[in-house]
């Protein structure tokens, strides 16, 4: 079973999945170990695993547990100290969302109702996992294409991972948003949306409830954020009734990627508020409902992260965000 280990200096948690590393040819991909069955067939077309009930008719979207997931809903997680080091004996729950029964590779090729159902399923599973007191955070994400960590076998699926700790990257965002709120009494994302819509130079596209833009300080080529215009810190609450609108903007954006930048490998991650504000009376995060704003980050894999980025945390983006936005706006779909 994979375990969680904490870097004692900066507090970043790492999943050590030793049994995978030993498998030849499986050094890069740590999240899509479930794609082929023992006969080399697509295990999502030929699913034999038990389906997880989403609580509503899910339009052909199904959810299964990953092989490396904790499967016992009552299993306690044990945190131990090894001198300086912290270890947790399990990393959490990992569910796979099989987005369609059809063997299609790209979520952009599904119809709008199907994509909307995928978001509805994410929300249902996140709401369900929030009730589990063992977890502090849930991430829904997608890897598309081999360089984004997905095997080169095409069956569109995504992942939901619930962890017993708070990821460092999320903490940085929460702290930044909280500081801005303390100084200005406003949500930084709401202000950002306002400013971006006013200037419009980094806007790629928008719908009634969402805006897609290239961030001012983009790290990667064609990095794009999808932000809900209505304020909500949680994906699973904020998305209610807007699933179809999110499907529209996601599909539009991915079709622009397909046509304009040659259908690149990409990752998307849904950045939602952590659970533990509801699990404890932690005063530190009491304004999170006002200061944090859920959003989606899409990151095409067009360049590799090199030494400078790894050594400094600076990223080098070789095209100005304004030019990338103008280019994507101009791609007819
Ligand atoms: Zn398949
Ligand atoms: Zn906001």
Image (cartoon, grey):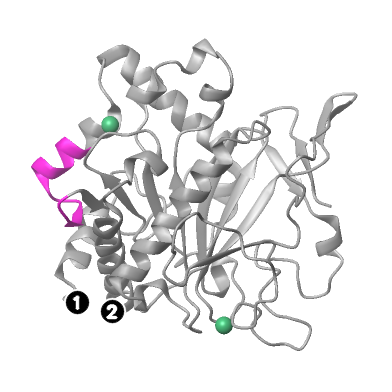
Callouts 1 and 2 close, C-beta under 8 Å:
yes
Residue 53 coordinates in the image, percent (x, y): 57, 58
- From this view, report whether residue 276 is shown above or below residue 307: above
Q: Is mark 1 within 8 Å of ligand 1?
A: no
Residue 241 seen by the camera: yes
Residue 202 coordinates in the image, percent (x, y): 20, 51
Towards the viewer: 162 or 205: 162
Secondary structure under the numbered disc 2 in the rendered image: helix
Region rendered in magenta: 193-208
Q: Is residue 116 magenta?
A: no
**Relative horizontal placement of residue 228, taking residue 28 as reference (left or right):** left
Q: Is mark 2 within 8 Å of ligand 1?
A: no
Q: Residue at x 15, y 36 (%)?
A: 194
- From this view, report whether residue 151 is shown above or below residue 142: below
Towards the viewer: 269 or 96: 96
Mark number, residue 333? 1
Quadrant location of the C terminus in the rendered image: bottom left
Q: Is residue 197 magenta?
A: yes
Q: Residue at x 37, y 33 (%)?
A: 233
Residue 291 coordinates in the image, percent (x, y): 35, 24
Towards the viewer: 160 or 2: 160
Q: Which residue is disc 2 drawn over?
A: 259
Real-space Cα distance between discs 1 and 2? 8 Å
Quarter for ligand 2?
A: top left
The residue lying furthest to the right in this view is 82
**Relative horizontal placement of residue 187, taking residue 326 as reference (left or right):** right
Residue 7 coordinates in the image, percent (x, y): 74, 33
**Relative horizontal placement of residue 333, taking residue 1 as reference (left or right):** left
Q: Residue at x 48, y 70 (%)?
A: 99
């Amino acid at each position: 079973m994979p375990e969680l280990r904490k870097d004692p200096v900066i507090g970043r948690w790492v999943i050590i999945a030793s049994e995978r590393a030993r498998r030849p040819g499986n050094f890069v991909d740590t999240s899509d170990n479930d794609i082929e069955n023992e006969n080399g067939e697509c295990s999502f077309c030929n699913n034999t695993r038990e389906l997880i009930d989403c609580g509503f008719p899910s339009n052909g979207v199904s959810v299964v547990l990953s092989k490396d997931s904790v499967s016992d809903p009552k299993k306690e997680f044990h945190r131990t100290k090894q001198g300086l080091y912290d270890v947790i004996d399990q990393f959490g729950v990992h569910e796979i969302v099989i987005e369609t029964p059809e063997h299609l590779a790209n979520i952009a090729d599904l119809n709008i109702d199907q994509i909307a159902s995928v978001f509805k399923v994410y929300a249902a599973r996140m709401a369900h996992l929030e009730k589990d007191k063992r977890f502090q955070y849930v991430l829904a994400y997608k890897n598309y294409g081999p360089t984004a960590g997905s095997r080169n076998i095409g069956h569109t699926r995504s992942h939901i991972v619930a962890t017993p700790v708070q990821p460092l990257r999320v903490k940085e965002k929460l702290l930044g948003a909280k500081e801005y709120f303390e100084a200005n009494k406003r949500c930084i994302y709401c202000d950002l949306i306002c400013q971006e819509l006013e200037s419009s130079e980094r806007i790629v596209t928008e719908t009634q409830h969402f805006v897609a833009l290239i961030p001012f300080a983009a790290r990667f080529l064609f990095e794009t954020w999808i932000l809900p215009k209505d304020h909500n810190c949680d994906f699973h609450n904020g998305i209610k009734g807007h699933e179809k609108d999110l499907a529209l903007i996601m599909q539009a954006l991915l079709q622009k990627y397909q046509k304009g930048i040659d259908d690149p490998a990409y990752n998307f991650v849904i950045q939602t508020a952590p659970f533990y504000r509801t699990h404890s009376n932690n005063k530190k995060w009491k304004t999170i409902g006002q200061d944090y704003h859920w959003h989606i980050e899409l990151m095409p894999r067009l360049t590799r992260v090199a030494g400078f980025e790894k050594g400094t945390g600076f990223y080098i983006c070789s095209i100005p965000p304004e030019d990338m936005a103008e280019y994507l706006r101009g791609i007819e779909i």
